[in-house]
């Protein structure tokens, strides 16, 4: 079920999702800005062979697989 979060909850939730993922991560957002902390967590998941997919953009679908 979808859950809507405020800015602080989003930051915390994304970090938890990235840290705890065991199989795959799919993040979908019209606006997303990853700081260095997220990039390091994504790299860690790559090293663990956990695929991370980002879908972002308000007017068009953009996919990024890490």
Image (spheres, grey):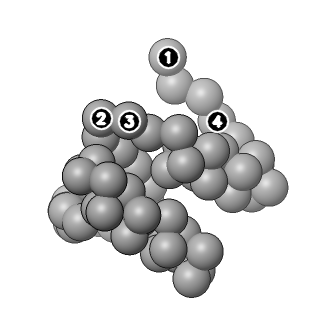
| 33 sits to left or right of 9 | left
- Eye-nearest disc, 2 or 4: 2
Mark 1 and mark 3: Cα distance apart in space:
20 Å
Give coordinates of residue 48: x percent, y percent: 32, 53
- Give the secondary structure at mark 3: loop
- Give the secondary structure at mark 2: loop
- Eye-nearest disc, 1 or 2: 2
Image quadrant assignment for residue 42? bottom left
Give coordinates of residue 3: x percent, y percent: 60, 28
| 4 sits to left or right of 58 | right
Q: Which residue is mark 4?
A: 4
Give coordinates of residue 23: x percent, y percent: 30, 35
Mark 1 and mark 2: Cα distance apart in space:
19 Å
Q: Which residue is mark 1?
A: 1
Mark 1 and mark 4: Cα distance apart in space:
10 Å
Q: Residue at x 31, y 63 (%)?
A: 47
Mark 3 vs 2: CB contact within 8 A: yes
Mark 3 and mark 2: Cα distance apart in space:
4 Å
Q: Residue at x 42, y 64 (%)?
A: 44
Mark 2, Cα crowd under 10 Å, few <14 / some 14-19 / many 20+, is few
Mark 3 and mark 4: Cα distance apart in space:
23 Å
């Amino acid at each position: 079920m979808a859950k809507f979060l405020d800015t602080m909850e989003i930051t915390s939730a994304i970090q938890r999702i990235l840290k705890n993922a065991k199989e795959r991560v799919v993040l979908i957002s019209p606006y997303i800005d990853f700081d260095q902390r997220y990039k390091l967590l994504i790299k860690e998941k790559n090293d663990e062979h956990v695929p991370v997919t980002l879908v972002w953009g308000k007017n068009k679908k953009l996919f990024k697989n890490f």
